Image (tube, rainbow, N blue to C red):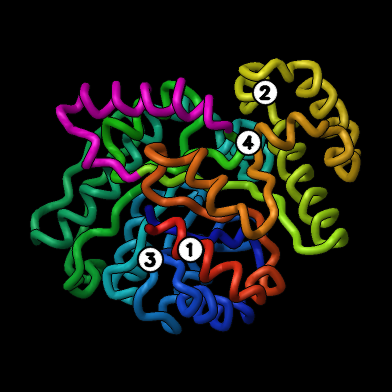
Amino acid sequence: MKVDLIVPRMPLEAVPALARRVEALGFDGLWFGETGGDPFLAIALAAEHTERITLGTAVAIAFPRSPMVMAYIGWDLQRLARGRMILGLGSQVKGHIERRFGLSWKAPVPWLRDYIAAVRAIWASWREGTPLNFRSEHYHLTLMTPFFTPEPNPYPDAPIYISAVNRAMLRLAGRVADGVHVHPLHSERYVRELVLPELEAGWRAAGRDRSALEIVVPVIIASGRDPEEWAESRHFARSQIGFYGSTPTYRVLLELHGFAEHADRLRALAAAGRWSELADAIPEEMLHTFAVVAPPEKMAERLRERYRGLADRLVFYGLRPPRPLEDEAFWSETIRALKD
């Protein structure tokens, strides 16, 4: 199992030092989310200051960028990172697509299917020197001249991963993606009973097998060496669960565990703009269902118990750099134990 870290948001000027620190601690990968800035700028900085670790987006929102724009980004960053780039894409929910990005909403599964195919067709045109001729329901791309063709890329095309929560998107991941990002709001039961069967249905329908798909599982953790750290970590984990749980898209996860009333409560708080109250609305049972809660010396053991056979890459999610990375003993021991 590979062990990674995700950084949801941080100032760009802090990225080089963080990336060097993450690599030195023994992590296998560093992921950047698109929550408060452009993750591709962070990857460019991290690529300059690291040699070994995988660098990827978890995730970049696909639809606001045309497939051509995304193809250029992925091509250039794969060169800069010397083959260590992973292009992680997400569809986002309807409200954000319409009201934050100003686009018209379409059914996301066929839209993302065509989007991925278009990006790969552009890369193939550049790599093979063949005319661009991609036609689908959502995209017609037929113009590529030498002037707009980038310099040759000595590295393979960047793998394309997608985030998936519901059955249809999970099946799409199984059919066409190189990897899948499981949502941070998940439980072991959800991964076993819904995620894995739907992924398998997808890869079997496409004539692929399990080895074609890397399963990336971000994990919300709560831990601490003293009461102050415990309190801060548990509150932050609750706030993450509350934020995601307030979104209707993720209600299926809460209902699976009998938390439908809590989903209604979280949704009402979000609708009223009472974001600071979300953490306090998460009961202890809900915290332990969707997060791994353990003291530092037990964290690796709990993670192995929950995710053995479920994840190819385990991603520590929601940490606030740089303070959590200062505990070198915890990270070196935990990473080593998870890789054994």
Q: Viewer-nearest of labels 4 and 3?
A: 3
Q: CA distance from mark 1 to mark 4?
A: 41 Å
Instruction: Residue under label 3, please give it.
Output: 54
Q: Is residue 197 above or below residue 91?
A: above
Q: Amino acid at mark 3?
A: Thr
Q: From mark 2 to mark 4, how far is it between C-alphas?
A: 25 Å
Q: Is residue 293 left or right of residue 97?
A: right
Query: Residue 263 location in percent, x, y?
Result: 76, 23
Foreground residue, 187 or 338? 338
Q: Magenta region: which residues?
A: 187-214
Cα–Cα gap, marks 4 and 3: 32 Å
CA neighbours of label 2 inside 10 A, class few (<14), some (14 to 19), many (20+): many
Q: Earlier in the sequence, mark 1 or mark 3?
A: 3
Of the two numbered discs 3 and 2 on the same chain, state the one appearing first in sequence.
3
Give the spatial CA distance, label 1 vs label 2. Answer: 30 Å
Q: Which mark is residue 254?
A: 2
Residue on which the image places disc 4: 98
State how far apart marks 3 and 2 are (Cα). 32 Å
Amino acid type assigned to the residue bearing label 1 in the image: Ile
Residue 149 in the image: state x and y as whole percent: 22, 67
Residue 162 in view (yes/no): no
10 Å crowding of disc 1: few (<14), some (14-19), many (20+): some
Judged from the image, the secondary structure of the residue bearing numbered disc 2 is helix
Q: Nearer the viewer, mark 1 or mark 4?
A: 1
Which amino acid does the dot numbered 4 rest on?
A: Glu
Reading the chain from its start, which is encountered first: label 4 or label 3? 3
> Which residue occupies 45% across, 26% down?
192
Q: Which residue is mark 1?
A: 335
